[in-house]
Image: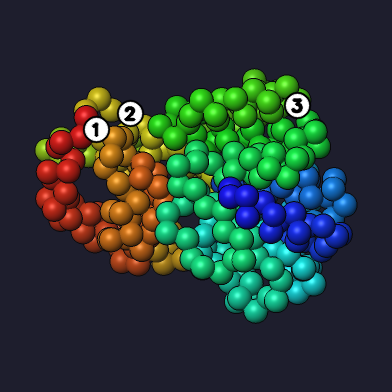
Amino acid sequence: MTTQQVKQIKTLLSQPKNIVVVGHKNPDGDAVGSCLGLCNFLNQIGHHATVVMPNDFPEFLKWIPEADTIVNFEKKTSKARKLINHADIIFTLDFNALNRTGDLEPLLEKSEADFIMIDHHQKPDNYAIVTYSDITMCSTSQMVFQTIEALDGTKKINKNIATQLYTGIMTDTGSFRYPSTTAKTHRIVANLIEAGANSAEIHQNVYDTNTPDRIKLLGTALNNLVILSDYKTAYITLTQKELDEHNFKKGDTEGFVNYALSIKGIIFAAIFIENKQEGIVKISFRSKGDFSVNEFARNHFNGGGHTNAAGGRSETTLQKTISNFIAILPNYKDDLLKNV
């Protein structure tokens, strides 16, 4: 964050304001953690802040302190609309294009509030008066910590804020194992632990909550695993029928794609999940080294994200989506084979 950006934010926050903190559609741990952490801090320094999410988030994140204060636009549309219409400032966290908010997009586009973006995804749109964008960051939650630090507010980081931000950092770094995890990340995490975050408890709350149905769904996913060794690629498929048979709930497939990526010699992995209700196939991509799944998702599957983690979607059938994916791979063979 530049000195000028810090000055702008301090000026905007110099008087009590009505503030809405918005995360992206289908919020993950980083979106929920960063939004709650920032909201908590803003309320502590005298503002009236509320988190609004486009839709619900997974059950394994519901334990996070103050998660029950989040206004779900799908379920509480009138309340969310009123909050946004009366907002003086809107922080957008963990996304950099308003279309990532789904049905919230038109409401945000009409808002006369001052927008502040805090995000670590590539190619941000130009809608905010302050755009704090850094693709080298491991998580938006780390960026929120650094924002609080720049605003001289680290003494305001209590146990709840520490827990919220730690959760966001932990989930977006794959428990601190992704390349974007830096020495600075670990120093920030140490500060959060000193402020009250219980690392063992947080890890247990996020990862040790499997139901029998989820474990069996994972078994089905792994049974569907296909390895394309000529391209150092592996992919997993899940049909709507398979999801239904295992009583699928939001978040149940979180992390499944990493099993494909963990195979020795694989540097590109994907999972394709059929969603009959939306008429799409949801896709998650992961990679190792410098093979950019962000560019792959942007070029072929209406998505994007980071170099080693991205998402996409297809509006054709699951089988056609897989066929298309396989047909594209020869174009990337040289890039895939040169990676470790």
Q: Which residue is label 2 attached to?
A: 262
Q: CA distance from mark 1 to mark 3?
A: 39 Å
Foreground disc of the pair 1, 3:
3
Label number found at residue 195: 3
Q: CA distance from mark 2 to mark 3?
A: 34 Å
Residue at 59% x, 39% y is 142
Location of the C terminus by quadrant is top left
Q: Which residue is label 1 attached to?
A: 266
The 10 Å Cα crowd at callout 3, few under 14, some 14 to 19, many 20 or more, is some
x and y percentages locating residue 305 in the rendered image: 42, 51
Q: Quadrant of residue 141?
A: top right
x and y percentages locating residue 104 in the rendered image: 62, 69
The answer to which of 297 and 124 lies nearer the viewer is 124
x and y percentages locating residue 285 in the rendered image: 35, 46
Query: CB atoms at circles 1 and 2 under 8 Å apart?
Result: yes
Q: CA distance from mark 1 to mark 2?
A: 7 Å
Q: Is residue 48 left or right of residue 194?
A: right
Residue at 15% x, 36% y is 338
Q: Is residue 260 above or below residue 33?
A: above
The answer to which of 257 and 81 lies nearer the viewer is 81
The 10 Å Cα crowd at callout 1, few under 14, some 14 to 19, many 20 or more, is many
Residue at 30% x, 35% y is 288
- Helix or strand or loop: what does disc 2 sit on? loop
Q: Quadrant of residue 259?
A: top left
Q: Is residue 238 left or right of residue 230?
A: right
x and y percentages locating residue 162 in the rendered image: 72, 33
Q: Is residue 87 above or below residue 118?
A: below
